[in-house]
Amino acid sequence: MKTLQFLVIGKNQEILDTLKRIIENNEGWKAEIQSDENICYNYLKENQVDIVLLSSGLEEQFEKDIKVFCENLDQDVKVIDHYGGGSGLLKNEVYALFPNLQP
């Protein structure tokens, strides 16, 4: 089974902690959380990331910039705008990007 590596970016620490817990409750899913946008660019350059999950509190310009940055990486990084909706919605968003992983 492929391990999915997430980078979860947002400004609300409680939400980030909850998203990390929800993500890591799925076998083979691992999450790094980050509230400092500036660190994200180097993290993406230096680590294999499958999904960047954009959470609440981010500036619109950063969201645009990080999407362009991810498109231009040599890796195939998917970006999900996730602003809530529970674990079921998150799973559906992930499985829409990786349908071969759906149980």
Image: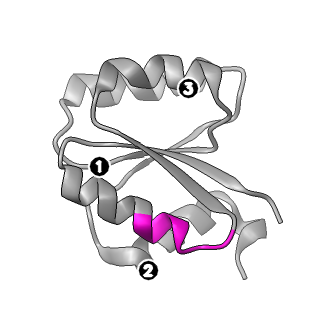
Task: Locate residue 79 relative to residue 2 in the image: left or right.
Answer: left
* Of 37 and 97, the residue lying toward us: 37
In which quadrant of the rendered image does the C terminus lie? bottom right
Quadrant position of residue 27 = bottom right
Residue 101: image location, x then y, percent: 74, 69
Q: Which amino acid does label 1 sit on?
A: Ser
Identity of the residue drawn at 21% across and 30% down: 60
- Asked if residue 6 is positioned above or below residue 96 in the image, the reply reads above
Identity of the residue drawn at 79% across and 59% down: 2
Labels 2 and 1: the sequence-earlier one: 1
Q: What residue type is labelled 3?
A: Leu
Quadrant position of residue 85 = bottom left
Residue linked to disc 2: 88
Residue linked to disc 1: 55
In which quadrant of the rendered image does the N terminus lie? bottom right
Labels 1 and 3: the sequence-earlier one: 3
Identity of the residue drawn at 51% across and 72% down: 91
- Closer mark to the observer between disc 3 and disc 2: 3
Residue linked to disc 3: 44
Magenta residues, as a range? 21-27
As helix, strand or loop, the secondary structure at mark 3 comes to helix
Residue 46: image location, x then y, percent: 63, 21
Mark 3 touches mark 2? (CB < 8 Å)? no
Q: Distance between the residues labelled 2 and 1?
A: 16 Å
Q: Callout 3 environment at 10 Å: few (<14), some (14 to 19), or many (20+)? A: some
Labels 3 and 2: the sequence-earlier one: 3
* Of 50 and 95, the residue lying toward us: 50
- Asked if residue 57 is positioned above or below residue 70 in the image, the reply reads below
Say if the magenta span includes residue 24.
yes
Q: Callout 2 environment at 10 Å: few (<14), some (14 to 19), or many (20+)? A: few
